[in-house]
Image: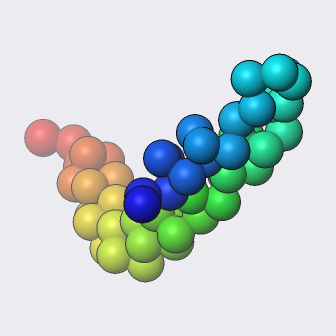
């Protein structure tokens, strides 16, 4: 079961609970942000430098 399906199955149809899906979504985003930070830093900085050169 993927994380998105797991968060969906935790919903209770008789009670409006917003904290659980939001917390799950934030926890799902943390590894993606870390991966983008580690892998994409070099490309992000080089893109900024390339865009800053006039010509």
Residue toward you, 42 or 31: 31
Q: Quadrant of residue 54?
A: top left
Residue toward you, 27 or 41: 27
Q: Position of residue 31 (x, y in %)?
A: 52, 69
- Residue at the (67%, 51%) spot, across then down: 24
Q: Which color scheme did the rendering employ for the protein?
A: rainbow
Residue 21 placement, left or right of 8: right
Q: Position of residue 17 (x, y in %)?
A: 84, 30
Whether residue 41 appears in this view of the structure is no
Whether residue 34 appears in this view of the structure is yes
Q: Residue furthest bottom?
A: 38
47 shown above or below 38: above
Residue 26 placement, left or right of 48: right
Residue toward you, 53 or 5: 5
- Residue at the (48%, 47%) spot, across then down: 5
- Tally the marks: 0
Residue 5 placement, left or right of 20: left
36 shown above or below 14: below
- Residue at the (34%, 53%) spot, across then down: 48
Q: Position of residue 55 (x, y in %)?
A: 12, 41
Image quarter (top left, top right, bottom left or bottom right) of the N terminus:
bottom left
Q: Residue furthest left?
A: 55
Residue 21 placement, left or right of 9: right
Q: Position of residue 36 (x, y in %)?
A: 41, 65
């Amino acid at each position: 079961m993927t994380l998105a399906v797991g968060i969906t199955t935790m919903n209770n149809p008789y009670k409006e609970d917003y904290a659980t899906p939001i917390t799950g979504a934030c926890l799902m985003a943390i590894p993606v942000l870390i991966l983008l930070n580690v892998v994409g830093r070099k490309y992000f900085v080089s893109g900024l430098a390339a865009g800053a050169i006039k010509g």
